[in-house]
Image (tube, rainbow, N blue to C red):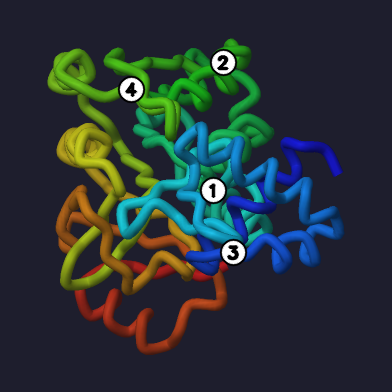
């Protein structure tokens, strides 16, 4: 296993469990304890975790795993969700995409839709996510608008007043939100307040708002609110979502699509 693969696996386990012991991690990854100790030390130097005697813990309740380490979490669910979201979008529409792993998959699903292979433009995509813009910019049939702003290393999202200036001048048909948490009472939320502010603007500029979130994020709260639940029109999630959770969202006037 390469170092990058080990680090990714370690961080996944750490976020899932909150704490990892050296011997436990070594057994999980089938490597030596000495290798895990070195990995923990190097990740601690990058402020990716907090080293403890005999192991490591996450940074705390506000800990946010960088996007490049999140791609394997609920991967199959995210791909199904992304395809369903992409199918909700019509040719010629102006679509806002926030950053995140699920919205990145939405961008990839749009890129392979046969009915979006041509057009002038086939789709207008407005995004504050550098990785999404990079993936779609090679598709000449798509008009790509990047908000501008200061890049945030954790998520590749552009934030700040420069992004505000662009978003205040446009109108969207649909905004697709990637979220850290979505709850009927507390609304859609992100881990970072600056990202939440840009995502909120995308919602405000859109005729329709779609939340794309796997079921592990539903009924949860996060630090920075993006919008209230009644601002969301559609929720696309996976089939592991509980019936009671679906009922609560539907009673709030949100259409739920579980795939």
Q: Secondary structure at mark 2?
A: loop
- Calculate the distance from the C-alpha at mark 4 to the C-alpha at mark 1: 26 Å
* Camera-nearest label, 2 or 4: 4
- Calculate the distance from the C-alpha at mark 4 to the C-alpha at mark 3: 32 Å
Q: Position of residue 188 (x, y in %)?
A: 26, 57
Q: Secondary structure at mark 1?
A: helix
Residue 80 visible, this orientation: no
- Give the answer, above or below, for where 137 lies relative to 102: above
The residue under the point 39% across, 51% down is 59
Q: Residue under label 2, please give it.
A: 141
Q: Position of residue 115 (x, y in %)?
A: 62, 33
Q: Position of residue 183 (x, y in %)?
A: 26, 69
- Calculate the distance from the C-alpha at mark 2 to the C-alpha at mark 4: 24 Å
Tell me the quarter of the image containing the C terminus: bottom right
Name the foreground residue: 248 vs 124.
248
Pick whichever of labels 1 and 3 is earlier in the sequence.
3
Q: Residue under label 4, please give it.
A: 158
User: On residue 87, which mark appears?
Assistant: 1
The residue under the point 54% across, 59% down is 53
For disc 3, the neighbor class at 10 Å (few under 14, some 14 to 19, many from 20) is many
Q: Are marks 2 and 1 in contact (CB under 8 Å)?
A: no
Q: Residue under label 3, please give it.
A: 20
Pick whichever of labels 4 and 1 is earlier in the sequence.
1
């Amino acid at each position: 296993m390469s170092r990058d693969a080990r680090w990714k696996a370690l961080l996944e386990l750490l976020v899932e469990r909150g704490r990892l012991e050296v011997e436990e991690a070594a057994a999980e990854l089938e490597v030596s304890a000495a290798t895990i100790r070195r990995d923990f030390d190097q990740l601690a130097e990058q402020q990716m975790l907090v080293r403890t005697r005999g192991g490591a813990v996450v940074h705390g309740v506000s800990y946010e795993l960088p996007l490049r380490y999140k791609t394997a979490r609920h991967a199959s669910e995210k791909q199904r969700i992304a395809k369903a979201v992409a199918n909700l979008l019509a040719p010629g529409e102006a679509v806002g995409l926030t950053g995140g792993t699920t919205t990145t998959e939405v961008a990839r699903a749009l890129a392979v839709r046969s009915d979006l292979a041509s057009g002038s433009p086939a789709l207008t995509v407005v995004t504050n996510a550098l990785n999404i813009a990079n993936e779609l910019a090679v598709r000449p049939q798509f008009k790509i608008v990047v908000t501008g702003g200061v890049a945030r290393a954790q998520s590749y999202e552009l934030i700040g007043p420069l992004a505000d200036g662009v978003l205040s001048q446009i109108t969207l048909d649909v905004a697709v939100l990637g979220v850290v948490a979505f709850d009927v009472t507390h609304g859609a939320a992100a881990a970072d307040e600056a990202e939440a502010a840009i995502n909120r603007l995308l919602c405000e500029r859109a005729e329709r708002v779609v939340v794309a979130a796997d079921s592990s994020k539903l009924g949860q709260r996060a630090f920075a609110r993006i919008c209230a639940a009644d601002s969301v029109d559609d929720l696309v999630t996976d089939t592991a979502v509980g019936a009671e959770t679906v009922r609560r969202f539907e009673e709030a006037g949100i259409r739920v699509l579980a795939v």
